[in-house]
Amino acid sequence: MLKKRLTGAVTIKNNLVVQSFGYNHYLPIGKPKVVVENLDRWGIDEIFIQIIDRYSNRLGPNIELIEEIASSGILTPIAYAGGIKNETQAAEVIRAGAERVCIDGLLHENLTEVKKISSRLGAQAVVGCLPVGVDNNGEIYWYNYLTKK
């Protein structure tokens, strides 16, 4: 029998947790560490931290945030997405305390680098993220943070 898993998604933009409305409008929620600590107390199975402005602003992963959260005493595994451009950065994210990396922008740009990341970290530590939306015609589309489409 399959066990259901509950993953808490923490979307971060401009260093604040936000609620996203169609990838265009954002409602501020609070500080990332506080939100993650609350999710950990609620007993979820995994915390998915996605920083949606790192890759499009050409910034690398927020290693300081991962280290701060991982060292705060939470017991819930962390999956991280945001700004990962290469195998070295993905390994830094794991060393900082995340158990898995989630790749989105790199899927659009460089599948060879995604394969390198998977080879180095192991396929179980790499997740492909596909943010999707529905357009006005009811068609499903894969949202690209780089082109904003």
Image (cartoon, rainbow, N blue to C red):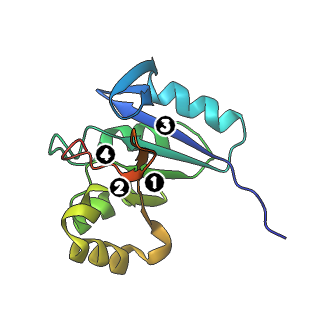
Point out the tag, 2 or 1, that comes first from the N-terminus.
Answer: 2
Give the total number of marks visible in the rendering: 4
Q: Are marks 3 and 1 in contact (CB under 8 Å)?
A: no
The CA span between labels 2 and 4 is 6 Å
The CA span between labels 2 and 3 is 16 Å
Viewer-nearest residue: 56 or 74:
56
- At a point 25% along the width and 49% down the height, the residue shown is 83
The CA span between labels 4 and 1 is 10 Å
Q: Nearer the viewer, mark 3 or mark 4?
A: 3
Q: Which residue is mark 2?
A: 93
Q: How many residues crowd mark 3 within 10 Å: few (<14), some (14–19), many (20+)?
A: many
Point out the tag, 3 or 1, that comes first from the N-terminus.
Answer: 3
Asked if residue 53 shows in the view, the reply is yes
Residue 66: x %, y % from top left: 40, 43
Q: Which residue is mark 3?
A: 10
Amino acid type indicated by mark 1: Ala
Q: How many residues crowd mark 4 within 10 Å: few (<14), some (14–19), many (20+)?
A: some
Amino acid type indicated by mark 2: Val
Examine the rendered structure and indicate whether residue 38 appears above or below residue 114.
Answer: above
Q: Are marks 2 and 4 in contact (CB under 8 Å)?
A: yes
Query: Which label was assigned to residue 63?
Result: 4
Classify mark 3: helix, strand or loop. Answer: strand
Classify mark 2: helix, strand or loop. Answer: helix
Amino acid type indicated by mark 4: Ile
Q: Which residue is mark 1?
A: 98
